[in-house]
């Protein structure tokens, strides 16, 4: 049984949560987020004390119960505070620039890599860091992972794109005998 799923999700002032026809909608100062909920596995009740989730008697219900509660918490945090991911670029000649809604990465390949920025993600580029902000944690996280996957940090010199605060295990390399 989910310990966090048992607790109702608190709804702060300025945020509206509604549930109709299997769609959970959260509206706040930073936008509106929606998510479909499998009603045959989880029931959703929106009340004065918050949003309560309860499992049905199905095989997948215990797993989805806490998952939907976590999704609701993330949606509420996204429309109130938002989320931020920061990527750092390390390497000589490695750089990024923003052209309109396209992120152009020069990461040592023979060609620049162009990536279109999703709708709900705002990107700013400063020197060797890329700051991404958005209200939808899934879209933001997937775009950050796609940018990092272009040139992940390598273990010998540490060159590549990494998350801020990510620790890369370094290898020793060749030794002269």
Image: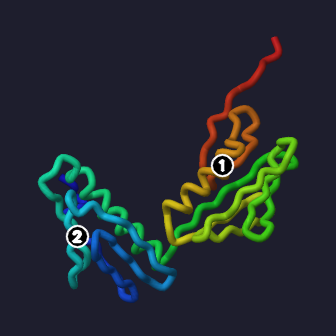
Q: Position of residue 98 (x, y in %)?
A: 78, 66
Name the residue beneath numbered marker 1. Answer: 148
User: Which residue is identified by label 2?
Assistant: 44
Give the residue drawn at x 56%, y 62%.
140
30 relative position to 3: left or right? right
59 or 29, nearer to the observer: 59
Query: In percent of the image, x 24 and y 58: which residue is there?
Result: 65
Q: Is residue 24 positioned above or below 151 on the image?
A: below
Circle nearer the viewer, 2 or 1: 2
Q: Which mark is residue 29?
A: none
Q: Quadrant of residue 18?
A: bottom left
Figure check: 160 above or below 30: above
Q: Secondary structure at mark 2?
A: strand
- x, y percent for residue 23: 33, 71
Crowding at dot 2, Cα within 10 Å, few <14 / some 14-19 / many 20+, comes out as: many
Residue 35, position in %: x, y?
38, 67
Horizontal placement of 31 versus 7: left or right?
Answer: right
Looking at the image, which residue is at 17% across and 52% down? 1
Residue 97 x/y as whole percent: 80, 62
């Amino acid at each position: 049984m989910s310990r966090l799923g048992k607790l109702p999700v608190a709804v702060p002032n300025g945020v509206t949560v509604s549930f109709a026809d299997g769609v959970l909608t959260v509206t706040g100062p930073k936008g509106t987020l929606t998510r479909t909920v499998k009603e045959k596995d989880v029931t959703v009740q929106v009340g004065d004390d918050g949003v309560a989730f309860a499992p049905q008697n199905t095989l997948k219900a215990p797993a989805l119960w806490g998952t939907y509660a976590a999704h609701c918490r993330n949606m509420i945090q996204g429309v109130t505070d938002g989320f931020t991911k920061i990527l750092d670029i390390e390497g000589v000649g490695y750089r990024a620039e923003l052209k309109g809604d396209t992120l152009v990465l020069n990461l040592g390949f023979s060609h620049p890599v162009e990536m279109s920025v999703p709708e709900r993600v705002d990107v700013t580029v400063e020197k060797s860091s890329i700051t991404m902000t958005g209200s939808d944690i899934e879209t933001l996280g997937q775009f950050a992972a796609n940018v990092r996957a272009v040139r992940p940090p390598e273990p010998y010199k540490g060159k590549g794109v990494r998350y801020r605060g990510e620790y890369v295990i370094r290898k020793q390399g060749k030794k002269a005998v």
